[in-house]
Image (tube, rainbow, N blue to C red):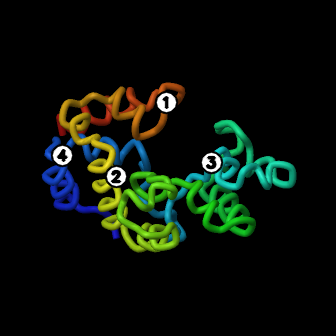
Amino acid sequence: MKLATQDFERAAQRLHCPLAAVRAVCEVEAPRGGFNPDGSVVTLFEGHWFYKLTKGAYAQSHPTLCFPNWTRIHYGKTWQEEQDRLKEAQSLAYDAACKSASWGRFQIMGFNHVIVGFAGVREFVKAMQESEGAQLDAFIAFIEHQGLADELQRGDWKTFARIYNGPRFYENRYDEKLSAAYRKWATS
């Protein structure tokens, strides 16, 4: 089920931030939505996290799935290819693969499952597969846990981007994309 205006309003109210800020993050993280055309949840598998979580166990046998440093070179060119990458990694080490992917409309990393309210990564994945509403709830919990509501309130996209997406956020101009999306939503 797609998010409705009242869902975004609920998140903005809970986080005490402008509605446009929540919509901006949503737009930049997963512009196509939280689900693929076949109904599977949108994911992005991060091989450097798989390397870290498996201590490089599959680096020799699966170098496009398990590598020491972040690179976008191995990302799937289509959502189907990205799903295939995740499934292949899951066949090697299911939980580590799930923790190494970002999930849903807000692309919350699986290794954050505890801070967004789930005892295990499998419960987190199940919730992300249920609805965009569950994905929004995970986003709210993540923002609260990371103390990022202030950045959303102030429109401090550089700090938000660094904490939400990591120290190399600038390589994808993540803060600039968030700022542009915010301006668009704030004036619509």
Labelled disc at residue 142:
2
Front residue (pair 116, 133): 116
Q: Tag 4 or tag 2, which sits nearer the N-term? A: 4
* Callouts 2 and 3 close, C-beta under 8 Å: no
Q: Is residue 106 left or right of residue 169?
A: left
Q: Secondary structure at mark 4?
A: helix
Badge 4 amino acid: Leu
Contact? badges 4 and 1 (CB < 8 Å): no
Tell whether 177 sits left or right of 63. Answer: left
Q: Residue at x 34, y 67 (%)?
A: 134
Pointer 4 residue:
19
Callout 2 environment at 10 Å: few (<14), some (14 to 19), or many (20+)? many
The secondary structure type at the circle numbered 1 is loop
Q: Residue at x 18, y 36 (%)?
A: 153
Task: State the image coordinates of residue 183 (x, y, percent, origin top left).
Answer: 24, 31
- Is residue 77 among the parts visible in the rendering? no
| Residue displayed at 58% across by 62% down | 98
Q: Measuring 13% from the left and 52% from the top, which residue is drawn there?
A: 13
